[in-house]
């Protein structure tokens, strides 16, 4: 039954989390996971998401290529929207292309909008951004208000958001470190308490050791459970504010709370905190609500806020600010809602909070005191049940539209793709939308899946959609500007209606980066930045994917792979030619002064060792006949009495250099199979392989050494006539020389193709 399947899935997920906890030696938390209903809601949602009644054959490799292709499809849609905007600007019908956000405070004329596209405009008050279209899965251009240096509220909000962001970061680790090292808190302690009677007079708990000289630590909880979450109450004298900082996701318990995203009613909560019936009919994220209720009760219990804002307190006129990042941001938002009846001037700054916190109407009513900040393509503010279902449906659609084998798609998606190539590359992999074959088993499974999903949606209750509450500031990168790196603009909670699959979707969630960005934004500066560039592809654009490293993606085609293999063979042959004791075969004929001629002892000589030749049949052996001789099975180093002349020494040096140059060249070639390289890198590779070729060739100076020359014995006067011919090691060296040269020519060819 569905219930038993849900129980098994819940137990399986709980077991996985417990295993992770054990493997991490409980460093990642997990001590409060009892597997007694904590994951019930997520298991239920997961079964609904996957529609467990219908089996769709999707493997891990399908998920990889499908999501990679979906990311490229999203990119193509964005590029198409920008191109349409450029065409409209040229045709002067841009008013039909640009949608002005209803929430904007000012509007820009059509002429000004065209100016935004063509030339940078000083002191402009809007920016053109892309928004996902719910109807046709495309994008359209929306005009948004940027934060203005002439607007006092904008300046104040950005300044405060930057100032208080450090608390959202420091609550993760720094507050605990200060309490332990500076204030003597025991390592295993879960709370930091101060005497409530002396808390107003005692100023010895400064956070100066982490650069916050005017901030005092008043109270902190470090215990992390399913309901309990670490938080701290601090006193910031620099801006005259009491700060409540709530930690974000950092443990397995936090992940479990993140996954409890079903909506719960706020009717009873409103009555308890002082709203009366005002919150009836409103809903909130279940996991966040449980954390916020615990925070509210714990703050009431420890009475620190009550004491700080009491009539006898010197801090009674201070502001109250609640901050948090990620899950902590969501908890801060709901906690602010609960504390507001007691502290009407309260403000909240939530940094990159989850995307499903409060219902639509209540989220809008919180704009007066909550400000949320989102960076770029951050995944967390876009995770909602609706967005995930949309992502699932688009994923199925992309997989069904693939017209080439999965292995070919795998090879294609691993090669970086520039914006101007998206349409061509995608057309080579996917059928046009609506033209995919419907006779495949996979398409039949998807059709059945969608039919059953639609029936369940009709029969079931309409799910309450949850949004990010308050005002929203979206901070986006501005790569086209020489001075400005980031632009903040006013967004709304409907803008994050799609999961954006990009390389920065996870890294954009990092709080240290966001803190640095907010502190670096200059409102006067960024108003000179052009949003979209209409110029042709530049050299910089051509190589903007160079830094991407994807193993075996072959961004330059298969030529670098062939060159890499040939150079690897060359390095093996080069090493063998240096190390074997059969580089040359040395035969000698001894002519005595009386004219008598006898064959000398044959030797197989290498650069560093030698092997004597011996008779195959000692009873019938002609030493002048090579067929009667064979090499000894043992190589021996040259004795100390053997002196190496300059040619022999040079041969040793050049043989070592050929290996060094070859290895460096192979490193460059290996990288070229995984990432796109600029022309100068190929030039360096060509030079290295030419040096390896020259060094390998100069190895044959050994043939001109005294070992291979005729000489006269100083005592007997006998003439020793030596003759050296290439042996196994010599042939290895010749082959390596040829292959090094082939690699050099290949690099020269790649250099020319990029010229």
Image (tube, grey):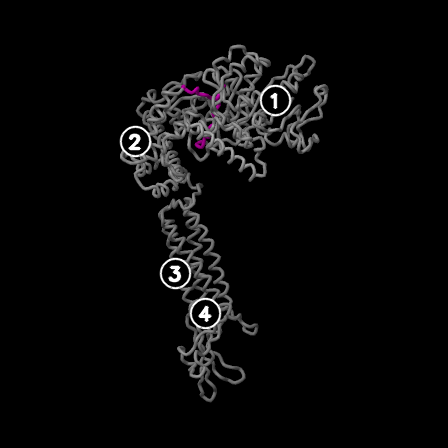
Q: Are marks 2 and 1 in contact (CB under 8 Å)?
A: no
Q: Is residue 152 above or below residue 483?
A: above
Q: Is residue 285 above or below residue 509?
A: above
Query: Disc 1 or 3, which lies upstream in sequence?
Result: 1
CA gap, disc 2 and disc 4: 66 Å
Q: Are marks 1 and 3 in contact (CB under 8 Å)?
A: no
Q: Residues within 10 Å of mark 1 (few under 14, many from 20)?
A: many
Query: Disc 1 or 4, which lies upstream in sequence?
Result: 1
Residue 227 in the magenta stretch? The answer is no
Q: Nearer the viewer, residue 25 or 621?
A: 25
What range of the chain is rendered magenta? 461-480
The residue where tag 1 is placed is: 243
The residue where tag 2 is placed is: 433
Q: Residue furthest bottom?
A: 594
The residue where tag 4 is placed is: 582
Q: Is residue 16 left or right of residue 240?
A: left
Query: Disc 2 or 1, which lies upstream in sequence?
Result: 1
Tag 4's secondary structure?
Answer: loop
| Residue 628 image position (x, y, % from top left) | 41, 79
| Residue 241 image position (x, y, % from top left) | 62, 20
Query: Disc 4 or 3, which lies upstream in sequence?
Result: 4
Q: Is residue 149 above or below residue 477?
A: above
The residue where tag 3 is placed is: 738
CA gap, disc 3 and disc 2: 52 Å
Whether residue 535 appears in this view of the structure is no
Residue sitting at 47 percent across and 14 percent down?
A: 281
Q: Nearer the viewer, residue 540 or 153?
A: 153
């Amino acid at each position: 039954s569905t219930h038993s399947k849900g129980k098994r899935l819940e137990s399986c997920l709980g077991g996985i989390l417990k295993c992770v906890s054990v493997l991490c030696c409980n460093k990642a938390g997990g001590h409060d996971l009892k597997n007694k209903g904590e994951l019930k809601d997520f298991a239920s949602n997961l079964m609904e998401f996957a529609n467990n009644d219908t089996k769709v054959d999707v493997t891990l490799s399908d998920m990889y290529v499908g999501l990679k292709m979906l990311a490229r499809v999203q990119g193509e849609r964005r590029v198409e929207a920008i191109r349409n905007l450029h065409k409209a600007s040229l045709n002067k019908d841009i008013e039909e292309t640009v949608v002005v956000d209803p929430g904007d405070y000012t509007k820009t004329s059509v002429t000004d909008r065209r100016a935004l596209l063509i030339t940078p405009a000083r002191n402009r008050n809007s920016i053109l951004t892309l928004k996902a279209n719910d109807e046709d899965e495309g994008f359209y251009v929306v005009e948004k208000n940027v934060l203005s240096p002439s607007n006092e509220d904008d300046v104040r909000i950005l300044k405060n958001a930057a100032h208080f962001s450090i608390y959202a970061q420091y609550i993760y680790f720094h507050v605990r470190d200060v309490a332990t090292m500076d204030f003597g808190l025991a390592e295993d302690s879960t709370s930091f308490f101060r005497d409530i009677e002396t808390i107003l007079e005692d100023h010895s708990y400064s956070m100066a050791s982490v650069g916050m000289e005017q901030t005092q630590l008043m109270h902190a909880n470090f215990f992390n459970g399913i309901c309990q979450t670490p938080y701290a109450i601090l006193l910031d004298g620099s801006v005259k504010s009491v700060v409540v900082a709530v930690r974000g996701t950092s443990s397995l318990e936090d992940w479990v709370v993140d996954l409890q995203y079903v909506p719960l009613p706020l009717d009873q909560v409103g009555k308890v905190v002082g709203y009366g019936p005002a919150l009836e009919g409103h809903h909130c994220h279940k996991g966040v609500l449980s954390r916020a209720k615990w925070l509210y009760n714990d703050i009431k219990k420890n009475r620190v806020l009550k004491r700080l804002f009491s009539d006898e307190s010197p801090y009674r006129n201070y502001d109250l600010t609640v901050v948090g990042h990620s899950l902590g941001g969501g908890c801060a938002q709901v906690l602010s809602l609960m504390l507001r009846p007691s502290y009407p001037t309260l403000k909240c700054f939530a940094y990159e909070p989850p995307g499903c916190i409060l219902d639509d109407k209540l989220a809008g009513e919180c704009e007066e005191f909550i400000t949320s900040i989102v960076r770029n393509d951050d995944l967390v503010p876009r995770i909602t049940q609706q967005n995930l279902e949309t992502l699932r449906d688009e994923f199925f659609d992309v997989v069904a539209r693939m017209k080439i084998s999965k292995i070919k798609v795998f090879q294609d998606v691993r090669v970086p793709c520039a914006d101007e190539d998206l349409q061509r590359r995608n057309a080579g992999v996917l059928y046009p939308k609506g033209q995919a074959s419907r006779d495949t088993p996979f398409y039949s499974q998807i059709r059945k899946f969608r039919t059953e999903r639609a029936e369940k949606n009709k029969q079931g209750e309409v799910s309450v959609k949850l949004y990010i509450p308050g005002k929203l500031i979206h901070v986006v990168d501005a790569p086209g500007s020489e001075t400005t790196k980031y632009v903040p603009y006013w967004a709304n909670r409907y803008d994050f209606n799609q999961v954006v699959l990009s390389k920065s979707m996870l890294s954009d969630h990092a709080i240290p980066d966001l803190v640095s960005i907010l502190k670096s934004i200059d409102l006067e500066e960024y108003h000179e930045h052009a949003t979209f560039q209409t110029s042709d592809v530049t050299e910089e654009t051509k190589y903007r994917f160079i830094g991407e490293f994807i193993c075996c993606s072959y961004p330059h085609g298969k030529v670098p792979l062939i060159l890499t293999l040939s150079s690897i063979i060359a390095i093996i042959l080069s090493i063998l030619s240096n190390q074997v004791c059969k580089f040359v075969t040395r035969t000698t004929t001894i002519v005595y002064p009386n004219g008598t001629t006898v064959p000398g002892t044959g030797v197989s000589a290498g650069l560093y060792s030698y092997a004597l030749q011996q008779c195959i049949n000692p009873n019938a052996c002609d030493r002048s006949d090579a067929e009667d001789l064979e090499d000894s099975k043992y190589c021996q180093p040259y004795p100390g009495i053997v002196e190496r002349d300059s040619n022999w020494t040079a041969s040793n040096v050049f043989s070592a250099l050929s290996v060094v140059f070859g290895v460096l060249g192979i490193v460059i070639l290996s990288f070229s199979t995984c990432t796109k390289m600029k022309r100068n890198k190929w030039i360096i590779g060509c030079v290295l392989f030419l040096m390896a070729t020259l060094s390998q060739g100069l190895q044959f100076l050994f043939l001109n050494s005294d070992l291979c020359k005729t000489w006269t014995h100083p005592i007997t006067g006998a003439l020793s006539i030596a003759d050296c011919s290439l042996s196994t090691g010599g042939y290895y060296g010749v082959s390596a020389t040829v292959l090094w040269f082939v690699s050099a020519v290949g690099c020269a060819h790649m250099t020319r193709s990029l010229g």
